[in-house]
Amino acid sequence: MLSVNEQALDIFNDIFEYPEDYNVAAHELDNGARIVDAGVSVAGGYQAGRVFTEICLGGLADVNFTMGQIKGIPMPFIEVSTDYPSIACLGAQKAGWTVKVGNYFAMGSGPARALSLKPKHTYEVIDYQDECESAVICLESDHLPNGEVMQSVADACKVDVANTCAIVAPTSSITGSIQVAGRCVETAVYKLNELGFDTRKIIAGMGTAPIPPVRGPKLAMGVTNDATIYHGQITLTMDAPEITEYLEKIPSNKSQGYGKPFNEIFKEAGYDFYKIDTSLFSPAEVIINELSKGVVYHVGEVNPDVTLQSFGLQ
């Protein structure tokens, strides 16, 4: 069985050993846990963002960058492709672990989740559980974890704390912008899972989204989510004729609140995340190639105006 932690560990070891190549900082704590700061007290950058995204996907995806345009305005884009969409996106990349120890708080994602089984239901429906002596976690936070936090992660993953690794970056950083935009394929797989579709039938996935500009901590969550909600374009290849039952519910334009930058929607909800229609967290446009019938379906569309408004360019 594929081990997302083992795959990710190879990538982590490289960035930890050669931090200067990625504009990051490497730290080893007193208890042996290893930390890579990819944007908290360092600049980070495109290569750090690529590696963060690859680690988050359990080493089961290729991540690349390209320059594109939105209504004639040049914009960097991230491209993610994987032949293991269910395991890479739901079994690793999904931000399904709230790491809270003392005063420390972070959104946890990445392959360590497949050891801690957070949340357990996700691993039941995709029928996956990792077995590895090392745990690699991705933390979305503006603070680095201390030894107590890493011990908590180790305990949840049932590994020795000296075998725990974390790569950390705040949302309001170059690395943060890249890794959230790099969840473009995940949003499609996650949405289908939420609709009750068996995501193990997805054979391959590829997606692209613009990398949003860093606009500060207050706007970071909204700007990074808008990249996929309004401009994420995904192609899924699957063997599942029943997909026709789910098609119209996949894209973000079917959600309540659609049509405004996320930060406006968040404000209208009284900054209560739980008052927001969760179906909004979906890609803008999806192409599905269904193999058993040899057909191709197309749903949704990009919304360049709202994308540029969110990015501060309109």
Image (cartoon, helix red, strand yellow):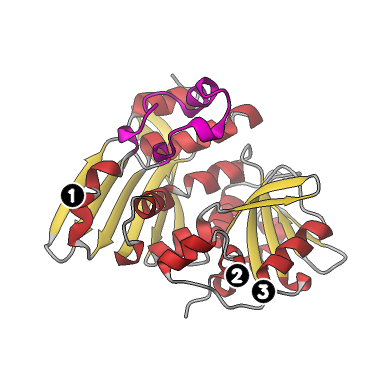
Asked if residue 271 lies left or right of residue 102, the reply is left
Q: Amino acid at mark 1?
A: Tyr
Residue pointed to by mark 1: 297
Q: Earlier in the sequence, mark 3 or mark 1?
A: 3
Which quadrant of the figure has residue 236? bottom left
Q: Earlier in the sequence, mark 2 or mark 1?
A: 2
Q: Position of residue 180 (x, y in %)?
A: 52, 45
The local secondary structure at tag 3 comes to loop
Q: Earlier in the sequence, mark 3 or mark 2?
A: 2
Instruction: State the extent of the magenta-drawn residues as a range.
Output: 252-281
Up the image or down, 201 lies above or below 133; here it is: above
Q: Which of these two is toward me, 238 or 16?
A: 238
Which quadrant of the figure has residue 230? top left
Q: Position of residue 122 (x, y in %)?
A: 47, 61
* Residue at point 75%, 74% (across, down): 160
Residue pointed to by mark 3: 134
Up the image or down, 88 lies above or below 99; here it is: below
Residue pointed to by mark 2: 115
| Residue 168 is inside the magenta segment | no
CA distance separating discs 3 and 2: 9 Å
| Residue 260 is inside the magenta segment | yes
